[in-house]
Image (cartoon, grey):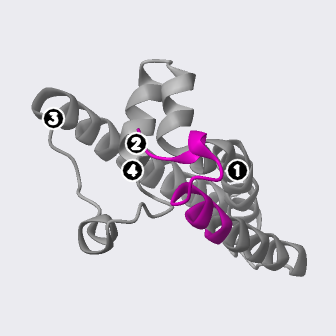
């Protein structure tokens, strides 16, 4: 491994560790106090946005309670493996080349995820799929 690649790998690992550390600190704070980040979209409109329930979903995952995690935010839970694979792919690309150029297939993938996100938003705020409604 070249020096540039080692430097880029170090950057990715340190930033990933920082994000994970902040996430675990937030999880500990939320578990101890019961306070979390409020959803402004829900506060203003009364609708549950596609991100509502993510904190509780991650807390349920830390307890290994997959059913509760799915109840809080099924969409993000299903996207986690895809997101992890994309992160690893992009991290490898960055370490090897120093860039994270986005190809056509990735752009199409992001558009598909965006459309699915809008669909999830609509479905979770209707009675069509009761399982998607926030508990």
Q: Which residue is mark 3?
A: 34
Q: How busy is the neighbourhood of tag 3: few (under 14 within 10 Å), some, or many (20 plus)? A: few
**Among the two numbered marks 1 and 2 on one chain, the one whose residue lies closer to the N terminus:** 2
Q: In terms of secondary structure, where does tag 1 sit? A: helix
Between label 3 and label 4, give the one nearer the viewer. 3
Between label 2 and label 3, give the one nearer the viewer. 3
Q: Which mark is residue 19?
A: 4
Q: x, y percentage for residue 97?
A: 76, 70
Magenta span includes 83? no
> How far is mark 3 from mark 4, CA to CA?
21 Å
**Among the two numbered marks 3 and 4 on one chain, the one whose residue lies closer to the N terminus:** 4
Q: x, y percentage for residue 42?
A: 32, 65
Q: In terms of secondary structure, where does tag 3 sit? A: loop
Q: Which mark is residue 11?
A: none
In-image side of 72 versus 105 (left or right): left
Contact check, label 1 and label 3, Cβ < 8 Å: no
Q: In terms of secondary structure, where does tag 4 sit? A: helix
Q: x, y percentage for residue 22?
A: 29, 46
Q: In terms of secondary structure, where does tag 2 sit? A: helix
Q: Which mark is residue 20?
A: 2
> How far is mark 1 from mark 3, CA to CA?
33 Å
Q: x, y percentage for residue 50?
A: 51, 61
Contact check, label 2 and label 4, Cβ < 8 Å: yes
Quick one: quadrant of the C terminus? top left
**Among the two numbered marks 1 and 4 on one chain, the one whose residue lies closer to the N terminus:** 4
> How far is mark 2 from mark 4, CA to CA?
4 Å
Contact check, label 2 and label 3, Cβ < 8 Å: no
| Stretch of the chain drawn in magenta | 118-135
In-image side of 34 versus 103 (left or right): left
């Amino acid at each position: 491994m070249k020096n540039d690649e080692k430097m880029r790998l170090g950057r990715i690992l340190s930033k990933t560790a920082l994000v994970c550390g902040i996430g675990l600190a937030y999880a500990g704070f939320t578990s101890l106090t019961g306070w979390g980040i409020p959803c402004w979209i829900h506060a203003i409109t009364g609708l549950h946005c596609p991100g509502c329930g993510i904190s509780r979903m991650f807390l349920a995952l830390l307890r290994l309670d997959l059913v509760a995690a799915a109840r809080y935010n099924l969409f993000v839970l299903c996207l986690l493996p895809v997101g992890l694979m994309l992160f690893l792919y992009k991290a490898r690309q960055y370490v090897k080349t120093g860039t994270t150029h986005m190809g056509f297939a990735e752009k199409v993938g992001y558009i598909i995820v965006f459309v699915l996100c809008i669909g999830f938003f609509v479905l979770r705020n209707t009675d069509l799929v009761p399982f998607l409604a926030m508990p």
